[in-house]
Amino acid sequence: MERLRPLLSFSYTALKSNLSELSSPYKLNFAVTLKCQSRCLTCNIWQLKPKGELSIEEIRELASKNRSFKWLAITGGEPFLRSDITEIVRAFAEASNLYMLTLPTNSLCNSGIVLSKLKEMLERGVPHTVITVSIDGSEEMHDTIRGIKGNYRKAISLFDLMHNMQDEYKNLSVVFGYTMSRFNQGRFMETFESVKNELPYVTCSDFHINIAQNSGNYYRNALEHIAVERSAAELELSNILSMRRNRGITDAIEGAFIKGMLYFVRNGRPPLRCRSLDASIFMDSFGDIYPSIMWDMKIGNVREADYHIGPILLSEAAAHAKEMIRSGKDPSHWTSCEAYQALIGHLPSLL
């Protein structure tokens, strides 16, 4: 029963969030650093030289004063560039009843160090940890989009090493993260076949799919043309859906997410109302709070609120953002950082 408690708590809260407003978000999207070794064509984070990011002492205080999180979605920059990444996970795991930990990597850090840190995270006892290994094309294409020669080979190697860890760590899942953009449109099958040639056990269901989108407060690419063409996206997403095989509830939700992405591409708006500021929030590495990764509307900073998020969510700025969401005036986007919260309560209608 003790092992089931985090799952039951997570499931209850996630479903409740789609029926009524929660007293506090259960998911924290946290960019722990903006430092990054990649030189991606779809993102400008790597051009920043961040100073004054939250220290581990500040993060511990933040975690201890905000104990409602059941899902910690870490992002970056490259999260493994923070030498204290395991301490960040530990702070939230000890303070909150975490069920889910998600974290991407570009595979450019030393693989031995990454695996060592991952093992430390897994031993914190969070029931479900998902690592996404970024890959945006076959070897030449991926290295071009990511701007680093040899990145593809490192991604393949790291995925295989992490995949082998799943036998020992049952709370670990590893997937490839593929972002569709104008730079690789129509090339997913080429990418899939290239990866499968290296790792024969990989299936289409081992890929998490995203589409490149613009964001002023996160990707810093608000004015750049990166989006995949609509017709190309529709065809590719339809083909991906036909190739996927559901192996359980996680695959079913991912399939629903891709169906929602197809709807978004066709209609220019998401199929479900955003759950930002209710089910989830986005915090950058300086403690600034936003409704979502894709919405450049700062509503507060945790340093200015003595590391309490509650007062920020009760602020006039937050109330204004919530009213925009209710009236459908928030920016249209469909990303896994925000979409999954809406999907969980509406899954039957999307399958």
Image: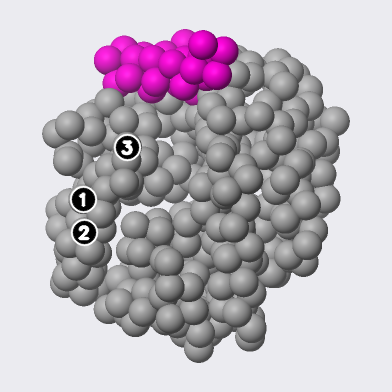
Can residue 144 be seen in the rendering of this structure? yes
In 3D space, how far apart are the residues under numbered discs 2 and 1 (Cα atoms)? Answer: 8 Å
Residue at x 21%, y 50% (from the top left corner): 259
**For residue 106, what is the image quadrant?**
bottom right
Q: Is residue 7 magenta?
A: yes
**For residue 31, what is the image quadrant?**
top right
Q: Secondary structure at mark 1?
A: helix
Quadrant into which the C terminus falls: top left
Name the mark nearer the viewer: 3 or 2: 3
Mark 2 and 1 residues: CB-CB less than 8 Å, in contact? yes
Q: Which residues are magenta?
A: 1-26
Q: Earlier in the sequence, mark 2 or mark 1?
A: 2
In 3D space, how far apart are the residues under numbered discs 3 and 2 (Cα atoms)? Answer: 16 Å
Residue 219 location (% of width, % of height): 53, 58
Q: Nearer the viewer, residue 108 or 3?
A: 3
Return the mark for residue 259. 1
Can residue 324 be seen in the rendering of this structure? no
Residue 138 location (% of width, % of height): 45, 82
Q: Earlier in the sequence, mark 3 or mark 1?
A: 3
- Number of numbered discs: 3
Q: Secondary structure at mark 2?
A: helix
